[in-house]
Image (spheres, helix red, strand yellow):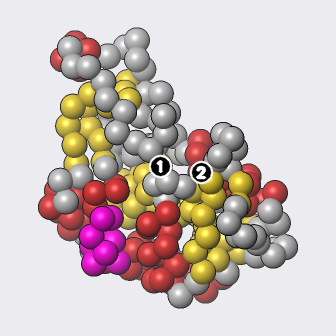
Amino acid sequence: MTESDVLAEFRAAEALLQGHFLLSSGKRSANYLQCARVLMNPQRAARLAIALAQKLPREIRAAVDVVVSPAMGGIIIGHEMGRALERDALFLERPQGTFIFRRGFALTPGQKVLMVEDVVTTGLSSRQAMEAVREAGGEVIAEAALVDRSGGDANLGVPFFPLVSLNFPVYDPDDLPPELAEIPPTKPGSRA
């Protein structure tokens, strides 16, 4: 699947939004990828996960014991990556602000983990989720994501394999371009 094929999937799902968006990082953007919309169709989600799994080097695919994703945004693509790799797919939650495993999910010591996200912007959520995996005894060997919108700046500490990299400009709230400052911001993601 080429980058334009991936973007066509986002456009077909009306998941490539334009406006004034408050990102979970606190930054602002005129563009937002609503991955929940692109993943709401099971066939599309499966196609994207298969394409993402194919981006992983063979040795990483073979080494993965389990797929882990952070809730909310990573759950669907994490589940589909588990299916594509024929591995169990667990997810982390943050009921009190810190990622933890719940619902009986657990890792065995030394289990090799592929972290899967929908979108990586700064990498902060990924690093926090990886810390929870380490605390649970797992070893994150790589991360895969549908979209890298960090401009290549996300330092995750492990090999990173995005399906597509998009470099939409992001702004600090006090440094908005005039045309963006005129539009009231909306918070489309899952985090308040």
Kindly identify the amino acid type of the residue bearing the numbered disc 2: Ser
Residue that numbered label 1 is attached to: 120
* Quadrant housing residue 41: bottom left
67 displayed left or right of 172: right
Mark 2 lies on a secondary structure that is helix
- Residue 58 visible somewhere in the drawing: no
- Residue 3 lies within the magenta run: no
Q: Residue at x 76, y 72 (%)?
A: 107
In the foreground, 148 or 99: 99
* Proximity of marks 2 and 1: CB atoms separated by less than 8 Å: yes
Q: Earlier in the sequence, mark 2 or mark 1?
A: 1
Residue 77 screen position, x and y as percent: 44, 67
Q: Which residues are magenta?
A: 39-46
Residue 116 screen position, x and y as percent: 53, 64
- Dominant SS of magenta comes to helix
Q: Dot 1: few (<14), some (14–19), or many (≥20) neighbours within 10 Å?
A: many
57 vs 135: above or below: below
Mark carried by residue 126: 2
Total residue callouts = 2
Q: Dot 2: few (<14), some (14–19), or many (≥20) neighbours within 10 Å?
A: many
Furthest residue to the front?
Answer: 103
53 displayed left or right of 185: right
- Residue 24 visible somewhere in the drawing: yes
* Quadrant housing residue 143: bottom right
Kindly identify the amino acid type of the residue bearing the numbered disc 1: Val
Q: Residue at x 57, y 62 (%)?
A: 69
Q: Residue at x 40, y 42 (%)?
A: 189
Residue 62 screen position, x and y as percent: 61, 86
